């Protein structure tokens, strides 16, 4: 055991005396310093003493920082990397530096930054990332930087910042975010409110200004006028047929997601069926029901047809299409979701649907709903299962008549085959 300890000390002493050839290493004011600035370096050189606490690699030609770039110097407290050609900082490049207090990455070309690098830097007090090409900062990027006092993000390409980005920075006293091309939409209003109320020093506020929309270009964020903003709301409704129309197997189910919000929310459908999960960004079809160019299966008619007006049509609805249908609306201020469970049943017969729920031949009355064959009805006030009844009988003429009447309501939205009845919401 004593021999092993002696070997370790010999190795450590050897490392303490080592220094990469292009650099100067020594002690100053009680700090172990490695000075590699202005050396025309194109990579972080190996062979640093393990006890280095300050490392300067400024004014070189470093193109990036790979994983493990600083594994030899785990005791670093200050790292200076300004004025290089760094474009990318890989995950794991900075993560081992848990003692780091000052990090300067300014005046580079960084567009790709693995923000997970910051999650282990809980001792960090100064972070300079100004004069780069950053376009996006995740909401949780600074979640571990509770000791951070100064943050410089000015002169980047940031268009917006997520609300709460600076909330973890409880010791922050200085913030620079000027000279970024901010989009002054609803998603940035929180920053104006926060900047006006915070005790954090934010210099050059007249240069924290809008680049878009054009009508607000050049307007300082502090003087941004009120904007009409609201979080999304959704209401999901459904209808399988005209009242009284007799349906035969292979009909169409129509769901409609009524969306409100400002700015206009993006609509997504999440469908969970016995065969798996389907995710759809609306719309995936045009007004003729055919797939839009660039979507999956663009040369065919999609199994689930999402229209721009918020409607979802499912042709040839059957047991394989049973499941949970959810519409999700999202904008800069948040999201809202509504769901309905859909099950297929035969009138007069009980059983269990694909969702494992028991049903009877008729749906019970509840919450203002009444039971009519061939209509979508909740199976009861305690669940939101939609029971769709197949017709007992019906002539082709009846189906065609129903299709013709409903087709007028849709103004030619879809043209279905011989045995399909076009179904849609009565309110559209």
Image: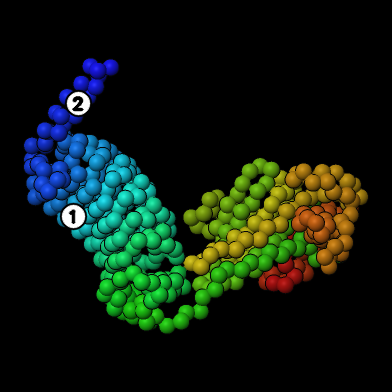
Colour scheme in the image? rainbow
Whether residue 285 is visible: no
Front tag of 2 and 1: 2
Seen in the picture, residue 311 relative to 299 is either above or below; the reply is below
Disc 1: CA contacts within 10 A as few (<14), some (14-19) or many (>=20): many
Q: Nearer the viewer, residue 243 or 169?
A: 169
- Residue 43 lies in what quarter of the image? top left
Disc 2: CA contacts within 10 A as few (<14), some (14-19) or many (>=20): few
**How far apart, in angstroms, are the residues tagged by discs 2 and 1?**
35 Å
Q: Are marks 2 and 1 in contact (CB under 8 Å)?
A: no
Q: Nearer the viewer, residue 347 or 367?
A: 367
Q: Secondary structure at mark 1?
A: loop
Rendering coords of residue 314 (x, y %): 68, 55
Rendering coords of residue 190 (x, y %): 44, 71
Whether residue 311 is visible: yes
- Which dot marks residue 82? 1
Q: Secondary structure at mark 2?
A: helix
Apparent side of residue 400 relative to residue 218 in the rendered image (left or right): right
Apparent side of residue 406 relative to residue 72 in the rendered image (left or right): right
Viewport quadrant of the N terminus: top left
Of the image marks 2 and 1, the number of the one nearer the N terminus: 2
Rendering coords of residue 186 (x, y %): 46, 73
Q: Residue at x 64, y 54 (%)?
A: 304
Apparent side of residue 304 relative to residue 26 in the rendered image (left or right): right
Q: Residue at x 30, y 76 (%)?
A: 205
Rendering coords of residue 365 (x, y %): 88, 61
Seen in the picture, residue 83 relative to 237 is either above or below; the reply is above
- Which dot marks residue 9? 2
Q: Residue at x 29, y 66 (%)?
A: 174
Q: Nearer the viewer, residue 120 or 257?
A: 120
């Amino acid at each position: 055991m004593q021999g092993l300890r002696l070997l370790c000390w010999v190795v450590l002493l050897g490392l303490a005396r080592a220094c990469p050839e292009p650099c100067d290493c020594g002690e100053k004011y009680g700090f172990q310093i490695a000075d590699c600035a202005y050396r025309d370096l194109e990579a972080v050189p190996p062979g640093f003493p393990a006890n280095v606490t300050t490392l300067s690699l400024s004014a070189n030609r470093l193109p990036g920082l790979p994983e493990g770039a600083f594994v030899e110097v785990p005791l670093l407290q200050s790292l200076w990397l300004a004025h290089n050609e760094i474009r990318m900082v890989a995950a794991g490049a900075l993560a081992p530096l848990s003692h780091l207090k000052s990090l300067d990455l300014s005046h580079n070309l960084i567009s790709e930054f693995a923000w997970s690098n910051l999650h282990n830097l809980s001792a960090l007090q100064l972070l300079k990332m100004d004069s780069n090409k950053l376009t996006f900062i995740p909401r949780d990027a600074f979640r571990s930087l509770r000791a951070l006092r100064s943050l410089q993000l000015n002169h980047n390409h940031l268009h917006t910042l997520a609300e709460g980005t600076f909330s973890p920075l409880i010791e922050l006293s200085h913030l620079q975010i000027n000279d970024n091309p901010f989009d002054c939409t609803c998603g940035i209003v929180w920053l104006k409110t926060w900047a006006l109320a915070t005790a954090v020093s934010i210099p050059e506020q007249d240069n924290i200004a809008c680049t878009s929309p054009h009508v607000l270009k050049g307007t300082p964020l502090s003087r941004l006028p009120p904007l009409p903003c609201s979080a999304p709301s959704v209401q999901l409704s459904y209808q399988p047929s005209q009242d009284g129309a007799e349906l035969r197997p292979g009909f169409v189910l129509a769901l409609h997601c009524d969306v409100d919000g400002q700015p206009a929310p993006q609509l997504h459908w999440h469908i969970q069926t016995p065969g798996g999960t389907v995710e759809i960004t609306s719309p995936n079809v045009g007004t003729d029901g055919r797939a839009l160019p660039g979507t999956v299966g663009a040369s065919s008619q999609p199994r689930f047809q999402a229209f721009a007006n918020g409607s979802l049509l499912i042709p040839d609805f059957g047991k394989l299409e049973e499941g949970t249908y959810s519409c999700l609306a999202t904008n800069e201020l948040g999201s809202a979701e509504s769901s309905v469970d859909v099950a297929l049943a035969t009138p007069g017969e009980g059983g269990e649907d694909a969702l494992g729920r028991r049903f009877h031949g008729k749906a019970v009355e509840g919450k203002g709903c009444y039971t009519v064959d061939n209509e979508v009805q909740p199976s009861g006030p305690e669940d939101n299962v939609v029971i769709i009844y197949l017709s007992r009988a019906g002539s082709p003429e009846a189906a065609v008549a129903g299709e013709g009447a409903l087709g007028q309501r849709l103004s030619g939205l879809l043209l279905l085959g011989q045995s399909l009845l076009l179904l849609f919401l009565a309110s559209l």
